[in-house]
Amino acid sequence: MEHLGEALETLFTARVMLYMLAGLIAGILAGALPGLTATMSIALLVPFTFKIHPPLAGMMVLLGVYVGAMHGGAISAILIRTPGTPAAAATVFDGFPLAQQGKAALALNVSSIASTVGGVFSTIILITVAQPIAGFALGFGPFEMFCLAVFGLSIIAGVSEGSILKGLIMGALGMLFASAGRSAVFDVDRLTFGIPNLPESDLRYIPLMIGVFAVTEALSQVETLRPPERGATAITRMFPTREQMKRLLAPLGISSVIGTLIGAIPGAGGDIAGFVAYDQTKKASRHKEEFGKGSIEGVAASESANNAVTGGAMIPMMTLGIPGDSVTAILLGAMIILGLQPGPTLFDNPDPKVQILVTGIFAGLMAANILVLPVRLLGAPLFSRTVAIAPHFLWPLVMVFCVVGSFAMTGTMMSVYIMLAFGVFGYAMKKLGFPPGPLILGVILGPIAEANLHRALSISGGNAAAMFKSPIALGLLVLAVLSVLVPWIQEQRARKLEAKDGTQT
């Protein structure tokens, strides 16, 4: 990081820090509101960040929202037994019982501390391992890069939310949608169906994502407008004692490692990390009887793990160009539009501006994970009141942001039409049980796979068999096959067990 000094000089200016702070507050508020996930919030804000200068300030808004939303999910999980984000699902187990016991402030403060520890730990790992991994990947040729993209597409099986077949269908549709318009490989128009002024593929990412995540969720939320169950939500100043902090050391350490590792696995996410860390912490605890009844260890385990996913998920995105989860898929699209190309060549780019921006992103992620702690602690009473916002006020406002954000991408109504079309499409797919994550992976990785396969076949004279002569390419293809087969086998076993249990009862 030879440009660290220049990056820090750009980062620690009043303008950039204010943008980061605004992102953190917006993220916490969004995370605290059930339905407004980190993915949806970032998708809404991406179009507005492209007009911000310097570019690092725009990225700090997005990273601030990412970090803040992961923190904010615990607020509603603790206070109203409804996780604000899927990653906070395991926090409900002990957070809500603590609120019912009149210890809502203790649970919120423990979650704040644990979230910060997990986020800082994963960012340190990201900064430490990113460049070595990218250095290794620099030896990849076109065939290796194609196989890497195939491996990235294979994690569709891991984000298919119950049906691998439906996930694969959505992934294929994503690649099909990404191929519409002007082909960067063959310089011809494809699948336009006579539609004029179709935006470039990079500019279609964001309206598509806004539609699939934000509009779809807004349409879904109007079907389930009911008041959530509430605990004792009075917020006072209640911090963990020295003895309680000692009890939290082991859960924080174990869960931060688990969250970082799971976050670095493409297709995994904060919800998986939270449940795994909760289970492992319970097994290692000397106070197992408290879990599920109001254990601060349980809250700490879930929150440190799901926040450790933030840095972990950015490892494959920054080093290999493969999104670790749906949030980093959107961040990847944002970086591409800003002129960055996450992947093996990112750290070897000779342009000082690129290196300053990359270094600033790493430093900014660390700063955001540290700054969010005092913001959470000082703003606990305010953030806790966000759960009382009436949904019939919230979701119309979300739709307004969807329209404005999409229009801001190109300054034409075509982006708005794309957003609305994919909102309706996403809603229909959700009703039919088709997950949105694979669609986004297909949109992002499909063009990468196509471009590298074309380049590789041009170099090899059309000999596709040359791919299997590369140990790296062959290894990636094997991993891709396993990524699909293992979840499929697990799914079949789960169905057999369910059928067996059904016949016994």
Image (tube, rainbow, N blue to C red):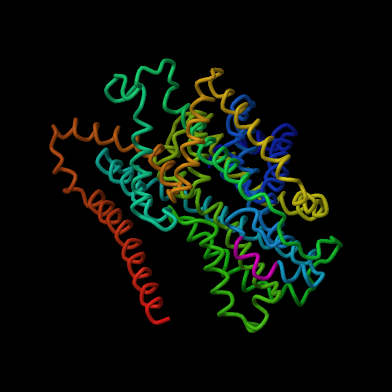
Q: Residue at x 63, y 38 (%)?
A: 60
* 14 left or right, relative to 324: right
| Residue 164 point in image, percent of width and height | 36, 55
Is residue 377 toward the left or the right of residue 74 in the image?
right
- Which residue sits at x=83%, y=66%? 238
Q: Quadrant of residue 11?
A: top right
103 in the magenta segment: no
Q: Tell me if residue 279 comes above or below residue 444 in the rendering.
A: below
* Position of residue 124 in the picture relative to residue 82 (left or right): left
Residue 359 horizontal/vertical position (percent): 56, 40
Up/down of 161 relative to 100, above or below: above
Q: Is the stretch drawn in magenta largely helix, strand or loop?
A: helix
Labels in figure, total? 0
Residue 157's image quarter?
bottom left
Residue 186 point in image, percent of width and height: 27, 22
Residue at left offset 57%, top offset 67%: 255
Residue that appears at 41% across and 42% down: 439
Nearest to the observer: residue 400 or residue 480:
400
Q: Residue furthest top?
A: 196
x and y percentages locating residue 350 in the rendered image: 45, 31
Quadrant where the C terminus sits is bottom left
Q: Which residues are magenta?
A: 89-95
Check the image and report above or below for 212 versus 166. above
Q: Nearer the viewer, residue 288 or 33?
A: 33
